[in-house]
Image (cartoon, helix red, strand yellow):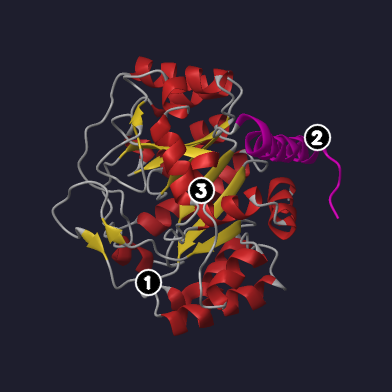
Amino acid sequence: MYLLTPHILRRFWLFLGATSCVLKSRFFTHRPFFISHVITSRCFAKCPTCLWRGQSIEQYDTTKIIKFYQQARNLGFVSTTIWGGEPLLREDLFEILGECKKLGMIVGIITNGYLLPQYYELLSKYLDFLIVSIDIPDEKHDQLRGVPGMFNNLLFGLKQIRGINPYLKVFINSVVSELNYKYVRKLIDFAEDLSLSITFESVNQGPVEFPRQEGKTVVDLRLSPEKEREVFNLIYQLKKKHSSINNSRSYLKLFKGGEVRYICHAPEISIRVYPDGSVVNCQDRTRSIGNVFEENLVDIIFSPQMKRLQKKAHSCSQCVDSGVIESSLFWNINFEVMANSMRLFIK
């Protein structure tokens, strides 16, 4: 049971707004409303499960980025998640976040947490939600990520943020792989000790998105089918007692059942924008849908290429991350997923 505080009421209002966007897009406008912005591929960490770290052309003209967000807002986009790479490496990040807030957008970032001690005050001011990636809830995390001091930095930063702004939605995200699956219980305990919630997801594998010297593909890190069923069944069972687990039962069932099949609606829900402004064509990554810094966004959204992508995605279920699957299930009016999403908004 939740007390109807102003913050809870605002979150409930945001959930209704998000649901309205899904319904309006699905039945009327047929266009995405959410931005997944890989603002940089630069990162000092060496996370073995990451596909998005490397060298890429990056737009450094802040004015162009802000203009893109202005166009997006005018077209009905309501939210952006900025990530990378490590987004806190962008010197103009908080200027961009501030402009997005002025536009009335819901704003969040995904970070590895190392720079939280430096930026926690500004993050507390500008964000609606913060996602911190954690693989192992102790100093072994540093070894896995290749950055000494990362765990202590993110732990300090998280505590500071909770102290400054206890109403900011802060999530832990953990990619379950051969490297950390034994730490599921400890990760849940870690999240609950900090009064946070946690999302688990499997590993997206394949060639990296941007050139880099080492680890040109992510392979052999996803759990075997048998082990994946076992681990996600454990998470499914733990969810009955731990409300800190964000995943819907529907998402977990796909993995504990051993066959991850769903109808993908990701291109109907969101656009993924890369550092150079290209809009990702996930079915043919050699050909982008367009470039938001060189073309009008409205032309990209209603282009034949976008329509083909949206239709072709329906027969694809390659992505195993929670963002793609949970949003696709929500789009399909899965009531359990919708109820779970409302819980995440208001808790």
262 with respect to 146 (left or right)? right
The part of the image, by quadrant, that contains residue 129 is top right
In the rendered image, residue 11 lying in the magenta stretch gets the answer yes
The part of the image, by quadrant, that contains residue 335 is bottom right
What residue is drawn where x is 58% and y is 48%?
Answer: 170
According to the picture, the residue beneath numbered tag 2 turns out to be: 6
Q: Where 128 falls versus 73 (above or below)?
A: below
Dividing the image into 4 quarters, which one contains the N terminus? bottom right
| Mark 2 to mark 3 CA distance (whole Å) | 23 Å
Confirm whether residue 239 shows in the render: yes
3 and 1 marks in contact (CB < 8 Å): no
Which label number is shown at residue 131?
3
Which label number is shown at residue 222?
1
Q: Where 225 falls versus 211 (above or below)?
A: below
Dot 3 or dot 1: first in sequence order is: 3
* Element type at mark 2: helix
> Along the line of sight, which residue is nearer the eye, 102 or 324?
324
* Element type at mark 3: strand
> Along the line of sight, which residue is nearer the eye, 72 or 94?
72
Amino acid type assigned to the residue bearing label 1 in the image: Arg
What residue is drawn where x is 36% and y is 39%?
Answer: 280
Amino acid type assigned to the residue bearing label 3 in the image: Ile
Classify mark 3: residues with Cα within 10 Å, few (<14), some (14-19) or many (20+). many
